Image: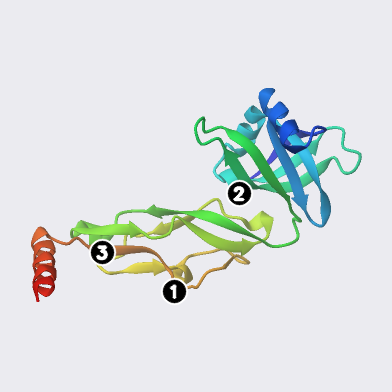
Amino acid sequence: MVQSSLRVRPRIRIGKSGAREVRKEGNIPAILYGRGEDPIPLVVRPDELKQALSNSAGINTVLELEIDGSESSTKRFSMVKEIQKDPVKNRVIHLDFLAIDMEKSLRVKVPVSTRGRSEGERRGGTLEKLMRTVDLECLPGDIPDLIEIDVSSLDMGDFVDIAGLELGEGIKPIRDGSKKVVQVIAQRSMEDVQDEEEEEEAETQE
């Protein structure tokens, strides 16, 4: 788990017009919800958000929100639930924070990384990464930065599925364990491709 602190302030101006005013000031409108509490509108500084998430965990960083002027608890553990970006300027225009309980499990998407070069690649095959992220369920303190797969022993046709991942204690995959994450496949030659095209053409003429 990677944890960062992020200072935010309550957002007085709510609704679309209020959000626009926050953006005009160069800040990001946000909302904190979850744990059965009323949603809290917030204002976030872009530079402080970037600094808080600039680590190996990225969006899976556990954030300790320091809410300036909050009458209740001034610090809330949370994670980024959703980031909305301007499709043209590619800047963050809204954030959803999910309040979390450090003693309760939650679901996260963890990126997949490979290490080494497979035996199948040395023999002319191709390593296919079929899943970029894996859905896991675990306590916030057990969230891995990434899932690294050593592919050096994989030969042609070999694969690693979800059930074959090395996960820490208390970390459970959500999806079917038989789903393949990476696989080594043989590269098809141009002759194979041409043969298939000729067979399809012959079937069409029949």
Q: Secondary structure at mark 1?
A: loop
Q: Which numbered disc, 2 or 1, marks the residue that appears first in the sequence?
A: 2
Answer above or below: position of 103 versus 177: above
Quadrant in the picture for residue 150 = bottom left
Q: Residues within 10 Å of mark 2 (few under 14, many from 20)?
A: many
Q: Quadrant of the C terminus?
A: bottom left
Furthest toward the top, the residue is 25
Depth order, front residue of 205/180: 205
Percent across and percent down for residue 148 are: 45, 56
Percent across and percent down for residue 160 are: 39, 67
Furthest toward the front, the residue is 205
Q: Secondary structure at mark 3?
A: strand
Q: Residues within 10 Å of mark 1 (few under 14, many from 20)?
A: few
Q: CA distance from mark 2 to mark 1?
A: 25 Å
Residue 7 shows up from this direction: no
Q: Which numbered disc, 3 or 1, marks the residue that appears first in the sequence?
A: 1
Please report the residue visible at 87 percent of the width from the left and 33 percent of the height from the top: 69
Percent across and percent down for residue 6 are: 71, 36
Q: Amino acid at mark 1?
A: Ser
Depth order, front residue of 203/172: 203
Q: Which numbered disc, 2 or 3, marks the residue that appears first in the sequence?
A: 2
Labels 2 and 3 touching (C-beta < 8 A): no
Q: Amino acid at mark 3?
A: Ile
| Residue with the mark numbered 2 | 60
Please report the residue visible at 10 percent of the width from the left and 58 percent of the height from the top: 190
Q: CA distance from mark 3 to mark 1?
A: 18 Å
